[in-house]
Amino acid sequence: MGSRPDLDDSYQQYIAGQTMDWSRLGYVQMVKDRVELCSAVMLLSDLHRMKSPARKILMFPRLWLAEAEETKKDPQTATTWRLLRTAARRYGVTLVPMEPIVDGADANLGSSYSLASIYSLAEFERVVYLQGPGTLLDASALDSMLAFSKSETMAAFPASPERKELSTSLLLAHPSKETFQQLKAQRASASMSDLELFQATFPVSESLIADWTLSRGNLYYESQSLRESVDEFNATAFEEATTYVRLSDPELPGPEYDVPYSDRVRLRPKNREAEEVWSRLYEDFRQQRMDVCGLDLEYMPVVLDGLLSGLLSKTEAETKL
């Protein structure tokens, strides 16, 4: 399984001598809808707790700043403002309002915003974006990648081991006004997802995180892969080798929802040690959601209840086959 990438000598020298300008290196989280805000603040709180020297940035719709005082009495809006204050005051996060990626688009719609806006952060030399929601186990490998990688316009996590497509799971970007304007123009020409926009703009062969960076541990990992674990899986080795785990299981609506225990039992990994890790990741997320955001897990809406039941039935049918 390997281990987390070792910190090289130059990184150790920095830690001792504070020789690097970390003010131009950052971790960025982007919130397009209010429901994403807590998870973003949680990830930034992980970086604060682990004492990452890089700056922490939270991008959110500028529209939120224009909300009238009476609107802020709405519970969801009040929570939004409370979490933004928490991010800034408790975790030292830089708050960056953003505009829709297409001029004139409806600012109330989450789909009007794009990951391309990270390229508007031109004061930064390099930024790392991690797709949430998830749990950061150790920031050191990401800090090292952020500090000592070359400033490529885009270095993305590959969508598959074959390295033929990029993904938006983990991005290391060199922001610039020129690239931002290029992406804005491309997006204005046709409606497309962030992934489609990046795939249309950046050549895959030149836009993936280097193989050697990914070869010495799980820099990015998805929880659903724990359900494919083999008998040799070792929980201690996994946690020592893994940097970040995105909590993403297709049959579940997300870690922020309170899924009935019986359903969770049916979905958890069959391997005992993998199941311990999987269950602990979800439980730690639940506890951190309360500690950081002051929020319990959300009740699963009826539409999601029906979706989950259908997925579970399909899973059980496939298992019988």
Image (cartoon, rainbow, N blue to C red):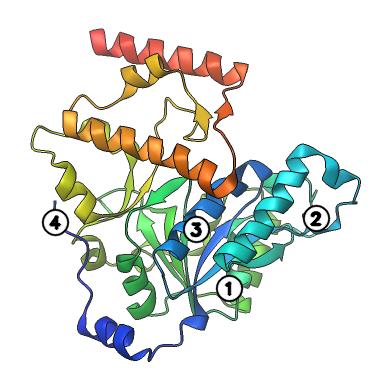
Q: Which residue is mark 1?
A: 179
Which mark is nearer the camera, 1 or 3? 3
Q: Which residue is mark 3?
A: 45
Tags 3 and 4 touching, CB below 8 Å:
no
Q: Mark 2 or mark 3: which is in front?
A: 3
Look at mark 2 in the image and give the residue it sits on: 63
Task: State which mark lies toward you, 2 or 1.
Answer: 2
Relative vertical location of residue 28 with respect to residue 160 in this rendering, above or below? below
> SS for tag 4?
loop
Q: Nearer the viewer, residue 28 or 101?
A: 28
Q: Is residue 58 visible?
A: no
State the image coordinates of residue 150 (x, y, percent, origin top left).
36, 80
Query: In the rendered image, which quarter is residue 224 located in?
Result: top left
Dot placed on the residue nearer the N-terminal end, 3 or 4: 4
Comes first in the chain, label 2 or label 4: 4
SS state under label 3? helix
Point out the frontmost of discs 1 and 4. Answer: 4
Q: Are marks 2 and 3 in contact (CB under 8 Å)?
A: no
Rounded to the nearest whole Å, what is the CA distance between mark 2 and mark 4?
A: 45 Å
What residue is shown at x 46% (from left), y 40% (from top)?
287
Amino acid marked by disc 4:
Gly
Image vertical order of residue 236 relative to residue 299, above or below:
below
Q: Which residue is mark 4?
A: 2
Q: Position of residue 27 (x, y in %)?
A: 49, 66
Q: Nearer the viewer, residue 264 or 213?
A: 264
Q: Residues within 10 Å of mark 2 (few under 14, many from 20)?
A: few
Image location of residue 191, percent across then percent down: 66, 48
- Quick one: label 1 or label 4, which is nearer the N terminus? 4
